[in-house]
Image (cartoon, rainbow, N blue to C red):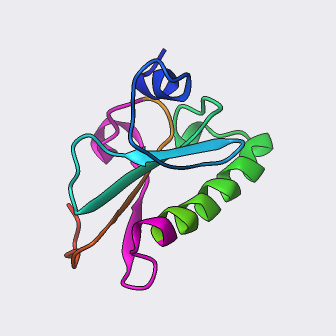
Amino acid sequence: MTIFEKIIAREIPAKIVAEGETWLAFHDISPQAPVHVLVIPKKLITRVGAADPEDAAILGTLLLAVQEVAQKTGILETGFRVIINHGRDGGETVPHLHIHVLGGRPLGWPPG
């Protein structure tokens, strides 16, 4: 069981920002920006490259959840970055699809 599954099950506390029927958003414990929220599906999808065609609806819902998170954290108007890591070289550390929502300051480019 991943740490995210434990958060979904409320076995580990998290500072929840928003929640929908199929997703959960909470503050990252190691923020890389003033606002750093993770949006995860409640269904275990290990990574974006492992999603199945039947996951299409939840994948779309996750992006709409990003919009809700940006609104609730006050970064919708000023701007934010959305990141999905895939695999070791992509920076993935937890094998459960998660979207990073970062904002609250200017974000440089390139990101890595």
Task: Find out whether residue 89 is within the magenta segment.
Answer: yes
Residue 84's x, y, as percent? 43, 52
Give the left or right position of residue 91, taking residue 61 as reference.
left
Magenta-colored span: 71-94
Task: Tell me which residue sits at (80%, 41%) in the image.
Answer: 54
Q: Quadrant of residue 44?
A: top right
Task: Tell me which residue sits at (45%, 21%) in the image.
Answer: 2
Give the left or right position of residue 65, taking residue 16 as reference.
right
Q: Quadrant of residue 51?
A: top right
Task: Tell me which residue sits at (22%, 75%) in the image.
Answer: 105
Residue 102's x, y, as percent? 33, 63
Give the left or right position of residue 25, taking residue 37 as reference.
right
Q: Quadrant of residue 110?
A: bottom left
Task: Find out whether residue 42 is within the magenta segment.
Answer: no
Taking 9 as reference, is 28 above or below it? Answer: below
Name, please, the residue furthest toward the top: 1
Taking 77 as reference, is 13 above or below it? Answer: above
Taking 73 as reference, is 30 above or below it? Answer: above
Residue 112's x, y, as percent? 20, 60
Q: Nearer the viewer, residue 89 or 96?
A: 96
Task: Tell me which residue sits at (37%, 73%) in the image.
Answer: 80
Residue 46's x, y, as percent? 53, 31
Q: Nearer the viewer, residue 77 or 61?
A: 77
